[in-house]
C-alpha cells in the first residue's frame, strides 16, 4: 500500500514488479517488513510484469531453480491466497515440454534426472502417450515430451497484488511526488537515512538504472540489474 516517503529503511527495493514485491514479501516473512521500503515510479506491475505469461513449470535443469519453482507452485496454488484473501488466479493444468531433435531429447533426459532427484511428478513420454494425454496437440515430428502434471499458470498481476497486500510498504512516485530514480545515492538534505541494502529488480528499466550504481562513504551498495 502506497505511503508517504519514509525517512529510514533497512532495505530499499527499486521496482514494483513481481520480483521486487516478491522480495519485499519474503523479507517481511523474515521479520524485515517494517524496515523494508519498495519504491515504484508508477503503479505496481506497470512495467513488464502485467503482460508476462505466468506459466510455472517443473521442467528445469537447475536444482536451485527447480526448488524455487516447486515452492512457487505451492505458494500460488493455495498458500498465498489463504494468507491474504486475495485471488491469484492459479490454474493447475499441467504442461508438456516437446523435443523435435535428438539434442532436445538429451536435454529432456537431463531435465528428467534433475526433476526426479528433487522428487517432482514428471515423466518422459513418447508421441503416442502424448496424444492420449493431450489429443489437441499437433505432434508431427515430435520425438518425445516431458509431462509435468503439477504445473500451471497464474495471473502475475494478481500474484503481485496479493503479496503487496500481505506485508509490503510501497512508495510510488505519484503518492510521494518522488519521480523516477535519478541516483542510487540518497540525498543528504531531506532526512533520508542510508539503507544497509539496496536492490533494483527493475527489468526493462535496469539499463538506465545501471549507470547509477554507487557506493557511498557509509557503504551503501546499490546493485541495479
Image (spheres, grey):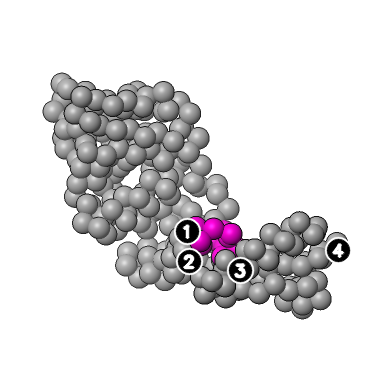
- Mark closest to the chain's N terminus, 3 or 4: 3
Please provide the residue range marked out in magenta. Answer: 55-66
Mark 2: few/some/many CA within 10 Å (<14, 14-19, 20+): some
Mark 3 or mark 4, whichever is nearer to me: 3
Residue 160 x %, y %:
41, 53
The secondary structure type at the circle numbered 1 is helix
The secondary structure type at the circle numbered 3 is helix
CB contact under 8 Å: marks 1 and 3 = no
Mark 3 or mark 2, whichever is nearer to me: 3
Residue 59 x %, y %:
60, 63
Q: Which residue is mark 2?
A: 70
The secondary structure type at the circle numbered 4 is loop
Q: Which residue is mark 4?
A: 140
Residue at the limit of the structure toward the left, as seen here: 191
Q: Which residue is mark 3?
A: 113
Mark 4: few/some/many CA within 10 Å (<14, 14-19, 20+): few
Q: Which residue is mark 1?
A: 64
CB contact under 8 Å: marks 3 and 4 = no
Amino acid at each position: 500500500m502506497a505511503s508517504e516517503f519514509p525517512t529510514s529503511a533497512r532495505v530499499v527495493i527499486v521496482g514494483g514488479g513481481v520480483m521486487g514485491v516478491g522480495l519485499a514479501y519474503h523479507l517481511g516473512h523474515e521479520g524485515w517488513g517494517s524496515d523494508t521500503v519498495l519504491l515504484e515510479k508508477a503503479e505496481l506491475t506497470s512495467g513488464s510484469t502485467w503482460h508476462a505469461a505466468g506459466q510455472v513449470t517443473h521442467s528445469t535443469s537447475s536444482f536451485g531453480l527447480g526448488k524455487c519453482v516447486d515452492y512457487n507452485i505451492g505458494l500460488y496454488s493455495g498458500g498465498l491466497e489463504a494468507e491474504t484473501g486475495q485471488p491469484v488466479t492459479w490454474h493447475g493444468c499441467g504442461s508438456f515440454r516437446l523435443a523435435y531433435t535428438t539434442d532436445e531429447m538429451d536435454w529432456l533426459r537431463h531435465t528428467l534426472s534433475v526433476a526426479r532427484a528433487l522428487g517432482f511428478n514428471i515423466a518422459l513420454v513418447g508421441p503416442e502417450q502424448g496424444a492420449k494425454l493431450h489429443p489437441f496437440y499437433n505432434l508431427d515430428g515430435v520425438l518425445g515430451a516431458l509431462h509435468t502434471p503439477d504445473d500451471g499458470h497464474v495471473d502475475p498481476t494478481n500474484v503481485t497484488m496479493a503479496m503487496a497486500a500481505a506485508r509490503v510498504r510501497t512508495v510510488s512516485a505519484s503518492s510521494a511526488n518522488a519521480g523516477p530514480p535519478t541516483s542510487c545515492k540518497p540525498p543528504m538534505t531531506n532526512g533520508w537515512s542510508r539503507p544497509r541494502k539496496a536492490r533494483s529488480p527493475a527489468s526493462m528499466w535496469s539499463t538506465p538504472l545501471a549507470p547509477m550504481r554507487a557506493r557511498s562513504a557509509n557503504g551503501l551498495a546499490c546493485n541495479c540489474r
